[in-house]
Image: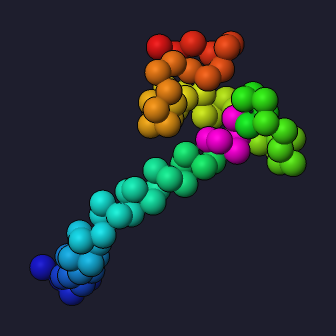
């Protein structure tokens, strides 16, 4: 085994040992950030005027696939958008 592969293995092992205790916390923080982005992007469609709506309009097609998981996490039984029925 070469020195580079040993070093790469050590690096992966150390990264795993460091990240393992924080994995759940990091996943929750990622979900919260994703939910905030979804609210910002969907604000105009939900009837909330926002200053960034012009810029976030381009992101709507990218987040349409995630609407179902988002509205379920927010505690809504069905989609809040009238033109998007995912349930």
Within the magenta stretch, is there residue 40?
Answer: yes
Q: Is residue 21 above or below residue 37?
A: below
| Left or right of 36, for residue 30 | left
Q: Is residue 67 above or below residue 37?
A: above
Q: In front here: 5 or 14?
A: 14
Residue at the spot 78% in from the left edge and 29% down from the top edge? 47
Residue at the spot 44% in from the left edge and 37% down from the top edge? 73
Q: In front here: 61 or 26?
A: 26
How far across and down, in percent of the image, does residue 21 sit? 24, 71
How far across and down, in percent of the image, does residue 57 sit? 79, 36
Q: Does the magenta stretch mainly form a helix, a strand or a loop?
A: helix
| Left or right of 2, for residue 41 | right
Residue at the spot 77% in from the left edge and 42% down from the top edge? 56
Residue at the spot 67% in from the left edge and 29% down from the top edge? 61
Q: Is residue 46 above or below residue 27?
A: above
**Number of marks in picture:** 0
How far across and down, in percent of the image, does residue 15 sit? 28, 76
Within the magenta stretch, is there residue 70?
Answer: no
Residue range of the region highlighted in magenta in the rendering? 38-42
* Residue 58 seen: no
Outermost residue toward the left in this view: 1
The part of the image, by quadrant, that contains residue 22 is: bottom left
How far across and down, in percent of the image, does residue 77 sit? 46, 21
Q: In front here: 33 or 19?
A: 33
Quadrant where the image shows the N terminus:
bottom left
Colour scheme of the rendered structure = rainbow
Q: In front here: 10 or 32?
A: 32
| Left or right of 54, for residue 60 | left
* Residue 51 seen: yes
């Amino acid at each position: 085994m070469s020195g580079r592969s040993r070093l790469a293995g050590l690096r992966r092992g150390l990264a795993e040992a460091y990240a393992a205790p924080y994995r759940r916390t990091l996943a929750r923080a990622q979900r919260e950030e994703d939910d905030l982005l979804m609210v910002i992007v969907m604000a105009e469609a939900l009837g909330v005027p926002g200053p960034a709506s012009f810029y976030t309009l381009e992101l709507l097609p990218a987040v349409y696939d995630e609407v179902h998981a988002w509205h379920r996490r927010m505690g809504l039984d069905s989609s809040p958008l009238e033109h998007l029925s995912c349930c």
